[in-house]
Image (spheres, rainbow, N blue to C red):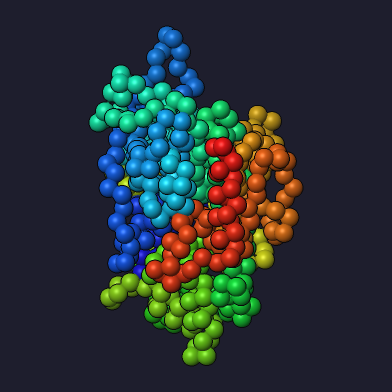
Amino acid sequence: MRSFLVLATLFGLTRASVLHYHHAASKGGHHVQQVLNSLEDAPSSPAYDNTSPYFYTDAIRDHFSHNVASPPSKWNQRFYYQDQFWGGDGFPVFLYIGGEGPQGPASERLFMWELAKEHKALMVSLEHRFYGESYPTDDMSVENLSYLTSEQALADLARFIEYISSLTKESALKSNPPLKAKFSAANSKWVSFGGSYPGNLATWLKLKYPSSVAGTVGSSAPVQADYNFYRYAQVVGAALKYDLIGGSDQCYDIVEKAVAELHDLVTLTVPYGSSENVPASLKPCTDMNDEYDLYAYESNIFGNFQGTVQYNMQMSGAATVADLCSELTSDAHSSPLGALDAMVGKYFASSGEDSCIASSWSEMIGELKEEAFDGSSAMRQWIWQSCNEFGYFQTTEGDGHPFTSLTSCSLKIAGEEMCKQSYGIEEYWGPQKSGDGKKYASTETYGSRSVQGANITIPNGNMDPWHSLGVVNATGEFYEPAELTRSENVVFIDGTAHCRDMYAPEAFASAGFNDTEPVQWAHQVIRQDVARYIN
């Protein structure tokens, strides 16, 4: 089984744990885009709006170092322009912010779509630099990756907003193909929307370029940098216990015992995992000769639970927390390890004789070293951003979760060695620090949880692992006091996973998941906030 690549998704549904930030895969888009793709692939789902892409040909590679003697280098940034609901001059513009993967047009599966229809808004979507087909440089060498930062991405957004707002017949030629606008957005108010890392960008856009947008909705935004992100595992454990979504104390306990049994079993032999007693669905794909291969293997065991919790009740055809716990607690299993074997075999194993757990560190690092653009891969780019700015490395350190036995998922390997070996860094001590070295540079730049801006809506779900780095209210286990303004609104949603509020009402009904009362309440609050921002 080529199981989850759980790369720090904001995303994976492919191979290796620290990469699971928000992207459901190394290819196919960031978290929200991946979920939308899943829904669009469902037999009963409507087709995407068939909007063709444009490229903004006047994008700037480096917003901060050019001057009159050194004009900026330009590049082509992909965007989508959907005007089917637009009421004309003075009606609002809704900006759908792209993130750590290829970006498609807005879909009717988005709540933003419904709000655009309600307010007769123009919808535009901008792909993030270095992802999809938006290439500011020839390749992804370490030298070129210096242009991949959240600050550059925010400046891209601000410049793009200015472009659309001041569109003329002449400036329309700065799009390929030339953009033909039916109306002018010169007097339109903008509202930005983003989820996960794009939720960060949506939030920070209002902080750093406050006049660009009237308001913003930054969903599931992990605004706090965290090098050793073991809180992710803590929320996964909490979800496995939470009866509202099908968890139980028994489920949690079985997972804790099962992974301890598995770790003890695979580390008894040399190579690791070569014992005939390793259950069929848990056998490694390749020999595990050192702690790095063991990490690749154990991070994928961990990743099955991570992916399920982060995407719980959002991916058509995917296992839910209730599914996993139902299988794990079945009386049919004689031991916790047997229950884990059955769960993996039922929900995560590929068909055929080659079903196994990916266990090659060199294969994983090889993908991260790939410098060529291909229009879809996101691993090298996102891990660079994690190493450079945010951390987000999901380890099994700390306590308060059932995965402590998976000791190879340490900060040493999942963070330090991942960054050093992928990018040729000789010494690595975590994401960049501020000038005094006391806090992360991103905290210095954006304020971490103290998001002090105007007209910012901040939704989070309490069963989303990423909410532990977000702005939540005092009822949350991971609440930390934060300085907010009176016009900021924290929307804390019970029982929901990552970016759940971003999807249209009953978007998952065809998959058997109806909107809960907390989701309905969140939509009502967001609807009221957006109306306030544009009115």
The quarter holding residue 272 reads bottom left
Q: Compared with residue 257, is residue 55 higher up or lower down, i.e. above or below?
A: above
* Residue at the (37%, 51%) spot, across then down: 107
Quadrant assignment for the C terminus: top right
Is residue 95 visible in the rendered image? The answer is no
Query: In the image, 31: left or right of 286?
Result: right
Q: Which residue lies furthest to the top in this view?
A: 69
Location of residue 490 in the rendering, given as x and y in whole percent from the top left corner: 65, 49
* Residue at the (31%, 53%) spot, across then down: 48
* Residue at the (48%, 19%) spot, across then down: 65
Q: Residue furthest left?
A: 177
Query: In the image, 516: left or right of 274?
Result: right
Is residue 72 visible in the rendered image? The answer is yes
* Residue at the (43%, 40%) spot, across then down: 121
Asked whether 38 or 489 is in front, the reply is 489
Location of residue 375 in the rendering, given as x and y in whole percent from the top left corner: 30, 43
Asked whether 202 or 269 is in front, the reply is 202
Query: In the image, 169: left or right of 207?
Result: left
